[in-house]
Image: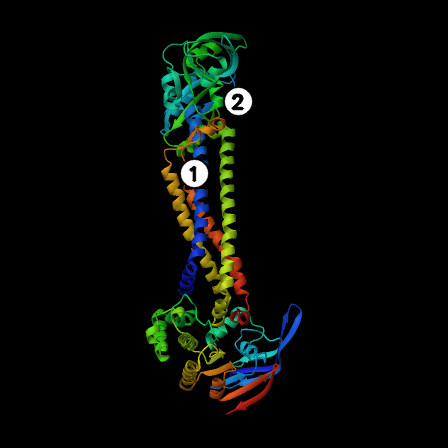
Amino acid sequence: MAILEARDVTKTYDTRGVETPALRGVSLAIEPGEFSALAGPSGSGKTTLLNLFGALDVPTSGEVFLEGQALGGRSGSELAALRLEKLGFVFQAYNLIPVLTARENVEFVMELQGVKPAERRERAERLLAEVGLAELGSKRPLEMSGGQQQRVAVARAIASGPRIVLADEPTANLDSTTAGQLLDLMHRMNRERGVTFLFSTHDPQVIEKASRVVRLHDGRVAADERR
Amino acid sequence: MGTWRIAWRNVFRNPRRTLIVVTAIAVGVGGAVFAMAINYGMVFQMVENAIDRDLGHLQIHAPGYGDDPGIAHRLAGGGAEVVRALEAEPAVRAFAPRLRGQALVFSPRASAGAELVGVEPEREREVTRIAESLSQGRYLGSSRRRVLVGAVLARRLTVKIGDKIVISVQDASGDLTGEAFRIAGIFDTASRDFDGGTIFLPLASAQALYGVGDDLSELVVVAHDRSEVEPLRDDLAARLDGKAEVRSWDQTQPLLRYMVELFDQMGWIVYGAVFVAMAFGIANVMLMAVHERIREIGILTAVGMRPRRLVGMIALESVVLTVIGLLLGLGLGLWAVASLQDGIDLSRWGEGLSDFGVGARIVPTLRRADLVIPAVAAAITALLAGLWPALRAARLRPAEAVRHT
């Protein structure tokens, strides 16, 4: 069974009476364990599709499935609960809560899940060590570099134990070396933990690393390359 | 815990803005507390002055006196049955007999209407402070021809200590009669009305003037504690079983009670205005805070924070901000009240205040409700003011919020 599936999904934005189609009848299935990328130029619909997979938005028509469950017709609260249990997110920037330390950011999602304090602290410290930031647990985001912040974001995305991590341009604000290190980290998570990773990107490093690249153009799937 | 931690730290994220808002709340609450203390100080003084001056805690009259106050309705035989009832009540500290009636007063230069109050001087001292209100002369003694006159009345009649006045009354039989008296003392209370229309004289003189034997108009009573007044009133009424009318001070002077209520309502209007202004200020600050953190709110929603929890977090920020301002404001108000316990001199407005029976020096006085109610109101204000921005935040679409610039 596909872990993520879009069936004939369209998304049209209505901005002050002007309709802008972002997706035009996209059907796509992502299998468990994939390390895949949605690629394409700006406006191709890759971020829109990622948002729909992540239950951050709703399609204008069509249906989106997460582990076989349809996302349509659910309340904001139900979608938030699904995201908490099944999804992790890494965004391009401003991933972290500025007033929380690195460890508190990682712990936060576990607290939302109801994990006990001692356990979530132990898991947070273990995850920070796993991403190479054991010594930065008490630092706030402003005290860290961009690359360090993205590593903490990865740790937080994994902390809730999701089966899927959605990453929207995670390397866009990083230099190539740091981007490469981040990518390696996420690839390791994919191999060692079996977490499915789906990127929205136009970074050649990410596209190179991905085992499957779905190219979007003008809101449609233009190509689907498996490697 | 995480929600509380985020809310608490967000309050101090923009120190300058927090300081401005907290100061505004503190000044508003402190000012309102102080205004309420002044307000209540005036009310308290107004009531205490009236009780100490003339009313006592309770007044007991013959049946029918309340509808037709006058010499016609009297407690016969010195009110013996009422006296027995009062002596049996442990809550009674003291009581004194009086005879009241209307009179015309003549001096060599002028005349005026006045109310005569016949009293037993030493017993009257135990229930009112008229003896301590003398600004000139001496208190009533053994002489039956000496009277006390209010300062305003004395000026109206252009008389001074030792001068003779003639008091003319319609006695109990309906005949006009009069006698001459000399002024022993002039009293000056905080009430212009009282000082302009009251004459005290020995009870026996008043009884002789009106031809009523040993009958009384009233017995004025003071209790050991103000809190015992209403139960005492009810006890006495039950004990006397319709043989006399028993009224507490606010029933004897409904106008005074209405004044008290009016002052109270004015005070609450001030509080209400302060809290409404505070609500808008807090809502404005929280709207700005939410707008600045749209992206962050998007992240919180994306990682799985439910809308209800998000609303609670932002409302909590609003409450924390308000509580800090409230505590500072209460402290400020309390300090202002404590530092002015010698009273505030309002003699510039003295003449106007005396119309309400209030002296020129007001001591700000706080009641427990004046502190508890603002605290509760502030918490409710904070919740409501923070709710609107919080609901706006919860309605943000996560996909748009995370990409907000």
From this viewpoint, is residue A170 visible? yes
Query: Helix, strand, or loop for circle 1?
Result: helix
Furthest-right residue in this view: A17
Colour setup of the view: rainbow
For residue B91, above or below residue B80: below
For residue B67, above or below residue B160: below
Q: Subunit of mark 2?
A: B
Residue B318 in the image: state x and y as whole percent: 46, 56
Q: Residue at x 41, y 40 (%)?
A: B367
In space, the residues marked 2 and 1 are separated at their CA atoms by 39 Å
Q: Are marks 2 and 1 in contact (CB under 8 Å)?
A: no
Q: Is residue A61 left or right of residue B314?
A: right
Amino acid type, callout 2? Gly
* Front disc: 2 or 1: 1
Q: Subunit of mark 1?
A: B
Residue A163 in the image: state x and y as whole percent: 46, 81
For residue B387, above or below residue A21: above
Q: Is residue B342 left or right of residue B393?
A: left
Q: Residue at x 35, y 72 (%)?
A: A137
Do circles 2 and 1 both sit on a common chain? yes
Residue A60 in the image: state x and y as whole percent: 62, 75
Q: Which residue is mark 1?
A: B37
Mark 1: few, some, or many residues within 10 Å (few <14, many ≥20)? many
Mark 2: few, some, or many residues within 10 Å (few <14, many ≥20)? some
Say how many tags the image has: 2
- The front one of A20 and A130 is A20
Query: Helix, strand, or loop for circle 2?
Result: loop
Residue A219 sits in quarter: bottom right
Residue B240 in the image: state x and y as whole percent: 45, 26
Q: Which mark is residue B64?
A: 2
